[in-house]
Amino acid sequence: MYSALTTAEQAARSLDRETWTPSEVPRPVASPARLAIDLDRVSKRFESDGSTAVAGISLAIPARSTCLVEGPSGSGKTTLLALMGCMLRPSAGRIRIDGTEVTRLPEDHLAALRRGRVGFVFQSHHLIRGATAVDNVEVPAIPCPGIDGRLRDRSMALLARFGLADRAHTRVERLSGGEQQRVAIARALVNRPSIVLADEPTAHLDADTAETFLALVNELRAGGATVVVASHDPVVCGAGLFAQVVRLRGGRQV
Ligand SMILES: Nc1ncnc2c1ncn2[C@@H]1O[C@H](COP(=O)(O)OP(=O)(O)OP(=O)(O)O)[C@@H](O)[C@H]1O
Ligand SMILES: [Mg+2]
């Protein structure tokens, strides 16, 4: 679930064949009035130890909107994002993504939905060791037939946006933690998802690079994407950028 497998699953998303640079905007996929993410009294209890990570969260995030999920360590941020990204099934409650009730969809339908719409920045990156930065960025596109050279242009443009043009051909285990985080952000965006879920995306970044990420959030939203960021980084939380703020404590909304 929180693994590279999920990232690889994103790979089947069909690629737009046009060259994309980060300053361009993704395709709008939903009308502004629609809810991109709709949670109704959602809870998640882990059977392994009986802990309840998320309890009774109701949340409506319109398409083309932004949402910040705040809360201390262990408050349920990652679990909530994983539920929104259909990587976890709720123990109770209902989840709709772009109007589709996903709560009881079979796994292959969920996988298709993730591939088609969701870009996820994992808190622990989940990069593929031994592969270069640019190859990691391209992982979500691997199963797509007919990939052309413009994928490489798009990947390189994303890496350049985050100051990694000269590190693109370096194996990721030789990159710093912050550089790896930037590769993970680029990978989440390479297929131009309509829903971007970013889990502590600036935890390893300096303030300037965190600002670059925030500028990107603005661009994504302006281009029609819905962006949810989980963070306790003061740069992110103090930016006043997000249309909606969800505060979690002990898995509950406060
Ligand atoms: N797979 C799991 N099995 C059992 N318990 C889990 C699992 N994943 C998370 N939890 C528990 O659920 C709670 C919320 O975890 P979660 O990772 O969502 O918090 P978080 O707010 O993202 O924390 P952090 O800021 O440290 O990343 C924690 O108490 C955690 O131990
Ligand atoms: Mg977390």
Image (cartoon, helix red, strand yellow):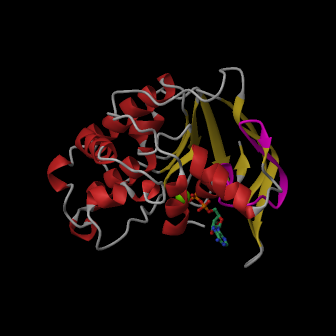
Expressed as whole percent of the image width and height from the top left, the position of residue 82 reads 63, 56
- In the image, taking residue 169 as reference, residue 90 lies left or right, namely right
For image coordinates 23% across by 42% down, the residue present is: 160
Residue 244 colored magenta?
no
Expressed as whole percent of the image width and height from the top left, the position of residue 158 reads 31, 42
- In the image, taking residue 149 as reference, residue 240 lies left or right, namely right
- Looking at the rendering, in which quadrant would you find the C terminus? top right
Residue 236 visible? The answer is yes
Residue 99 colored magenta?
yes
Q: Judge whether 44 appears above or below 189 on screen.
A: below
For image coordinates 59% across by 27% down, the residue present is: 65
- Nearer to me, 70 or 99: 99
State the extent of the magenta-drawn residues as a range: 83-100
For image coordinates 77% across by 66% down, the residue present is: 45
- Looking at the rendering, in which quadrant would you find the N terminus? bottom right
- Nearer to me, 48 or 140: 140
Q: Judge whether 13 appears above or below 6 on screen.
A: above
Q: Residue furthest front?
A: 146
Residue 3 visible? The answer is no
Expressed as whole percent of the image width and height from the top left, the position of residue 107 reads 73, 63
The picture quadrant where one finds residue 74 is bottom right
Q: Quadrant of ligand 1?
A: bottom right
Q: Residue furthest bottom?
A: 48
Q: Judge whether 100 appears above or below 48 on screen.
A: above
